[in-house]
Image (cartoon, helix red, strand yellow):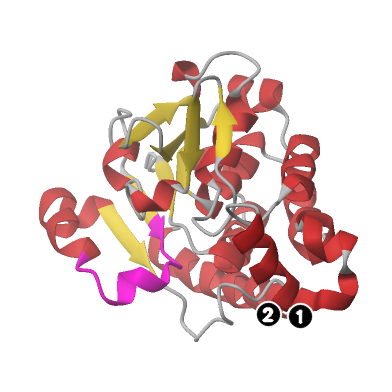
C-alpha cells in the first residue's frame, strides 16, 4: 500500500495578497489533504494564514478574508472615513506608523491559541525584533503561553504599521527577515513535500529560490500565482474575492501534481 507523503506549507508575506494563500488551502482542504499537512509556517500575512491553517477551521479563515472590512482593521478609516486612504498616510506620519488596533482585535478573535497549540500541524513564524535589530524564528512551543497571537501580530506588522510591543521588545514584519521561512519549516522531521506559496512582490526581483532549490531539490514545490494579483495594498472586498478565486483555481491545479 502506497504511503501518502507528508506535506508542509510555507507562506510568504504579501499584505492583502494573503487571500490567495487561503484560496490555495481551500482547494487542498476540500479535496481531503488537510490530514497530510504536518507543518505550516509563515512570514507577515503568511504567519496569520499559517496559524489559520494549523487551527483547521476553513470557514473561519474564509470569513476573515471575505467579510472583514478595511475600516475594521485601520483605526483612521474607522475614525475619519471621509479621509479615505489618504488619511492612512497622515496617520502613519503623525503616529510613527499606521495604527491597526482594529486588525489586532480581529486577529485576537479569529485565532485560538489553544487550538493552534493542540493542532496536529506544527505552526511556526518569523518576525523581526526591532529592539534587538535581528530576525527571530519560532515554533509554537518556543513562544510563551498567552503570547502566541501577539507574536503573530508582530510578524504581520507591515513596516508602514506601528511596531507591536511584546514585553521589552518591539516587533515588525517577519518578511524583513525572511520572505518565506522555508528553512524553518524543514527543521521539522519527516517532511516529504514542502509547498512554498509565494505572493511577495519582492520575490520578482530577489533570487529567493536559487539556493533553496539546490538545497532541497524535489522536496520543495514553489507556487506563484498563475495570474497577476491586485496590488498588495488593495484590501477591498473585490480584490480579496479575486485572489481567493485565483488561489482556489491554482490549488486545484496543484492537486494534479501532488495528490
Q: Is residue 128 left or right of residue 220?
A: right
Name the one closer to the observer, 159 or 249.
Answer: 159
Q: Nearer the viewer, residue 200 or 56?
A: 200
The percent coordinates of residue 98 (x first, y second) are 65, 57
Magenta range is 196-207
- Farthest-out residue, front: 94
Q: Cβ–Cβ below 8 Å for labels 1 and 2?
A: yes
Residue 175 at x, y = what percent?
Answer: 40, 52
For residue 62, what is the image quadrant? Answer: bottom right
Q: Is residue 188 above or below residue 161?
A: above
Helix, strand or loop at disc 1? helix
Looking at the picture, how far across and down is residue 154, in whole percent?
A: 54, 39
Residue 187 circle label: none
The secondary element bearing badge 2 is classed as helix
Whole-number angstrom distance, CA of label 1 to CA of label 2:
6 Å
Asked whether residue 69 is in view, the answer is: no
Question: What residue lies at 40% left-to-right and 32% top-to-bottom?
Answer: 131
Task: Name the residue rendered at 59%, 54% in the picture.
Answer: 97
Residue situated in front as seen by the camera: 213 or 73: 73
Rate crowding at label 2 as few (under 14), some (14 to 19) or many (20 or more) other CA atoms within 10 Å: some
**Looking at the rendering, in which quadrant would you find the N terminus?**
top left
Residue 199 part of the magenta segment? yes
| Quarter where residue 89 is shown | bottom right
Residue at image position (50%, 86%) is 228
Q: Is residue 142 left or right of residue 78?
A: left
Residue identifier under label 2: 242
| Residue 201, magenta (yes or no) | yes
Q: Which residue is mark 1?
A: 238
Q: Is residue 31 left or right of residue 75?
A: left
**Quick one: label 1, few (<14), some, or many (20+) residues within 10 Å?**
few
Near-viewer residue (103 or 221): 103
Amino acid at each position: 500500500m502506497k504511503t501518502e507523503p507528508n506535506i508542509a506549507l510555507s507562506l510568504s508575506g504579501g499584505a492583502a495578497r494573503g487571500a490567495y494563500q487561503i484560496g490555495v488551502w481551500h482547494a487542498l482542504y476540500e479535496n481531503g489533504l488537510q490530514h497530510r499537512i504536518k507543518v505550516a509556517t509563515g512570514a507577515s500575512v503568511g504567519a496569520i494564514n499559517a496559524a489559520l491553517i494549523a487551527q483547521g477551521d476553513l470557514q473561519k479563515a474564509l470569513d476573515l478574508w471575505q467579510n472583514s472590512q478595511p475600516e475594521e482593521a485601520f483605526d483612521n478609516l474607522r475614525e475619519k472615513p471621509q479621509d479615505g486612504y489618504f488619511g492612512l498616510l497622515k496617520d502613519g506620519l503623525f503616529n510613527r506608523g499606521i495604527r491597526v488596533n482594529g486588525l489586532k482585535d480581529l486577529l485576537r478573535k479569529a485565532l485560538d491559541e489553544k487550538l493552534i497549540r493542540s493542532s496536529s500541524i506544527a505552526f511556526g513564524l518569523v518576525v523581526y525584533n526591532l529592539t534587538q535589530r535581528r530576525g527571530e524564528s519560532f515554533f509554537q512551543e518556543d513562544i510563551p503561553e498567552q503570547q502566541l497571537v501577539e507574536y503573530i501580530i508582530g510578524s504581520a506588522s507591515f513596516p508602514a504599521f506601528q511596531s507591536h510591543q511584546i514585553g521589552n521588545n518591539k516587533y515588525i514584519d517577519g518578511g524583513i527577515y525572511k520572505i518565506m521561512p522555508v528553512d524553518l519549516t524543514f527543521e521539522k522531521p519527516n517532511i516529504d513535500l514542502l509547498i512554498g506559496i509565494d505572493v511577495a512582490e519582492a520575490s520578482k526581483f530577489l533570487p529567493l529560490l536559487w539556493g533553496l532549490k539546490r538545497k532541497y531539490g524535489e522536496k520543495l514545490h514553489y507556487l506563484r500565482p498563475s495570474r497577476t494579483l491586485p496590488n498588495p495594498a488593495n484590501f477591498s472586498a473585490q480584490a480579496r474575492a479575486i485572489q481567493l478565486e485565483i488561489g482556489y483555481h491554482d490549488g486545484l491545479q496543484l492537486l494534479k501534481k501532488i495528490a
